[in-house]
Image (cartoon, rainbow, N blue to C red):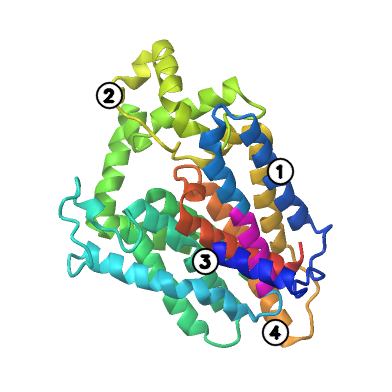
């Protein structure tokens, strides 16, 4: 981002910065500006302004990156969106090799759990699973929408999906499965065919859970926890941050605690909550969380309900790109239109579901993939 800012400054200094392609009344640009303005306002009234500076700067830099990416993608062909797929293939291949205990570029033998030794080039399996979702959707959308290279894109999408399943990340698996069902429904445009696809997705999605021992063990664990009403196990030990974030929203529903305020205020709010509902925290009193592990709750806790409304508005705007439009005669434009129509709603659905049990907006790699795909949609649909 520093490099991009330097280049923009140099272009501006030499009078070469042309912003005429920007429609300043476009919904996406107005929404981006609103998100930046509200983030700055929440930082100014934050419970700790110094803590709020880094996450506020990150939001502003992401906004600039998004706008620059939209401008760059404007006249590019649809396959250009697939640039993010190659790094995902590399990470997926490394992760699979680690999972099968064939090879790893790092010495992760000191990890507390065997599962946490699988890192790819990310950090942990949850990070990898969250990151692989968008490349898989982009590859599948290209396979369904492009005239050339369909089999290659389909094979790449299948490979990334296998890697996603092998991360054992339930939220990521659920998000990509539902998103793919939505994508195939958009592609088929027929209720009978959609029902058939739904059945196929359920069967194909269930096979790895039945055949792959780690996933099968996870299903048994979750089933037993549900029978015991063990919500701590069902939520993967995230009941505490979920309830604490909800308490934060209750106390400051308008402006929230400020960007970065969840981690800063977590322990104080946790203690207050434990005093009132001690029975819920018998086994989790010693834990401290830097993230809510639910971006719906964390966005609302840090930027209030207006900030959460802006988050939902962004999802709705991207999802609206899947509405059918008149087909254009130009082959390149037609390919882009088909790609955007197939990707818009599935992309929004995947982020909505993933954010229920993960925090992709707090991780650089997943955030960048979502920004890239959203920028392609905005650049080629002008929403």
Who comes first in sequence, dot 4 or dot 2?
A: 2
Give the residue pinned by disc 4: 332
Q: Estimate the x, y position of residue 127 in percent, counting from the top left.
A: 38, 54
At mark 1, the secondary structure is helix
**Which disc is residue 37 wearing?**
1
Q: Estimate the x, y position of residue 63 in percent, counting from the top left.
A: 64, 55
Span of residues in magenta: 61-72
At mark 3, the secondary structure is helix
Give the residue pinned by disc 3: 137
Does residue 305 appear in the picture of this structure? Answer: yes
Give the residue pinned by disc 2: 283
Who comes first in sequence, dot 1 or dot 2?
A: 1
* Residue at horizontal 57 percent and vertical 26 percent from the top: 249
Distance of label 1 from label 4 (alpha carbons): 36 Å
Q: Residues within 10 Å of mark 4 (few under 14, many from 20)?
A: some
Q: Is residue 106 left or right of residue 287?
A: left
Q: Is residue 205 left or right of residue 370?
A: left
* Residue at horizontal 43 percent and vertical 49 percent from the top: 171
**Which disc is residue 370 wearing?**
none
* Residue at horizontal 58 percent and vertical 22 percent from the top: 250
Who comes first in sequence, dot 1 or dot 3?
A: 1
Q: Say if 320 sits above or below 255 in the image.
A: below
* Residue at horizontal 32 percent and vertical 53 percent from the top: 124
Quarter of the figure with residue 138: bottom right
Cβ–Cβ under 8 Å for marks 1 and 2 = no
Distance of label 3 from label 2 (alpha carbons): 38 Å
Q: Estimate the x, y position of residue 380 in percent, counting from the top left.
A: 71, 71
């Amino acid at each position: 981002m520093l490099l991009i800012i330097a280049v923009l400054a140099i272009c501006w200094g030499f009078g070469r910065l042309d912003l005429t392609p920007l429609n300043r009344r476009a919904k996406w640009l107005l929404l981006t500006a609103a998100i930046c303005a509200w983030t700055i306002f929440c930082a100014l009234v934050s419970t700790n302004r110094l803590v709020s500076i880094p996450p506020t700067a990150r939001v502003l830099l992401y906004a600039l990156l998004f706008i620059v990416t939209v401008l760059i993608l404007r006249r590019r062909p649809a396959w250009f969106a697939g640039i993010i797929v190659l790094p995902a293939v590399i990470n997926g291949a490394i992760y699979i090799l680690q999972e099968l205990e064939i090879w790893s570029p790092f010495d992760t033998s000191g990890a507390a759990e065997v599962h946490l030794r699988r890192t790819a080039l990310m950090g942990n399996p949850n990070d990898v699973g969250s990151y692989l979702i968008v490349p898989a959707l982009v590859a599948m959308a290209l396979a369904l929408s492009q005239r050339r290279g369909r089999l290659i894109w389909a094979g790449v999408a299948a490979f990334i999906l296998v890697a996603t399943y092998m991360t054992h990340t339930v939220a990521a698996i659920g998000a990509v499965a539902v998103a793919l069902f939505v994508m195939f429904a958009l592609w088929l445009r027929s209720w009978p065919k959609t029902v058939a696809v739904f059945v196929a997705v359920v069967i194909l999605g269930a096979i790895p859970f039945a055949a792959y021992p780690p996933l099968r063990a996870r299903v048994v664990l979750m089933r037993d926890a549900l029978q015991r009403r063990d919500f701590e196990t069902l939520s993967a030990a995230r009941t505490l941050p979920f309830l604490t974030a909800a308490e934060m929203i209750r106390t400051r529903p308008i402006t929230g605690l400020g960007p970065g305020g969840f981690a800063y205020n977590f322990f104080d709010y946790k203690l207050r909550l434990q005093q009132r509902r001690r029975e819920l925290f018998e086994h989790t009193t010693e834990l401290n969380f830097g993230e809510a592990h639910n971006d719906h709750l964390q966005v609302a806790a840090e930027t209030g309900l207006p900030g959460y409304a802006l988050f939902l508005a962004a999802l709705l705007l991207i999802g609206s790109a899947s509405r059918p439009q008149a087909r254009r005669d130009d082959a390149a434009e037609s390919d882009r239109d088909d790609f955007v129509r197939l990707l818009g709603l599935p992309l929004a659905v995947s982020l909505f579901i993933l954010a229920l049990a993960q925090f992709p907006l707090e991780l650089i790699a997943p955030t960048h993939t979502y920004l890239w795909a959203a920028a392609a949609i905005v650049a080629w649909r002008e929403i």
